Amino acid sequence: MNPWTGSEGQTAFYRQIIDYDERYLRENEELLAKLTVPVHIVWGEQDGWIPVERADRLHTLIPHSSLCTVPGSNHLIQFDAPERLMYEVTSWLARASVA
């Protein structure tokens, strides 16, 4: 655990997770493009962990997806803007059930 402690170690740890996430996205682009289920992406505009550009990329890759970026929210939208997240999920579910 010693390499992952302290500010430098924690930064390296999170960078490693982000690198994995980017690789996972690249490796699965073809699968994402084949999705036929409704997808609504909700992303914090100030996400310091995974940049909002990743949400744009997912939205581009996933056919017929919808995207909402939440101003003033970071990575953990459920804590930063729980009411907005609940609104996005419930209104999207209502729209999806009508379609």
Image: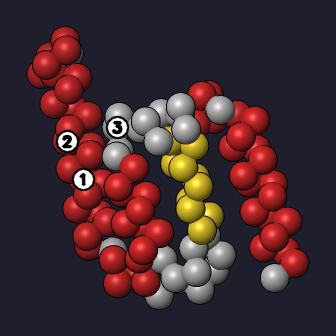
Label 1 crowd (10 A; few <14 / some 14-19 / many >=20): few
Question: Does residue 43 appear in this view?
Answer: yes
Name which residue type carries label 3.
Answer: Trp
Name which residue type carries label 1.
Answer: Tyr
Q: Residue at x 23, y 23 (%)?
A: 10
In this picture, is 58 found above or below 83?
below
Q: Earlier in the sequence, mark 1 or mark 3?
A: 1
Quadrant holding the C terminus: bottom right
* Alpha carbon separation for disc pair 2 and 1: 6 Å
Residue linked to disc 2? 16
Residue linked to disc 1? 20
Kind of element beneath mark 1: helix
The residue nearer to you, when weighing 2 against 44, is 44
The residue nearer to you, when weighing 19 against 81, is 81
Residue linked to disc 3? 49
Numbered-mark total: 3
In this picture, is 96 found above or below 11?
below
Contact, mark 2 vs mark 1 (Cβ under 8 Å): yes
* Residue 86: x %, y % from top left: 76, 44
Residue occupying the far top of the picture:
6
Q: Which residue is drawn at 81% across and 58% down?
A: 91
Q: Residue at x 16, y 30 (%)?
A: 12
Residue occupying the far front of the picture:
71
Q: Does residue 73 appear to the left or right of 52 in the view shown?
A: right
* Residue 87: x %, y % from top left: 78, 47
Name which residue type carries label 2.
Answer: Gln
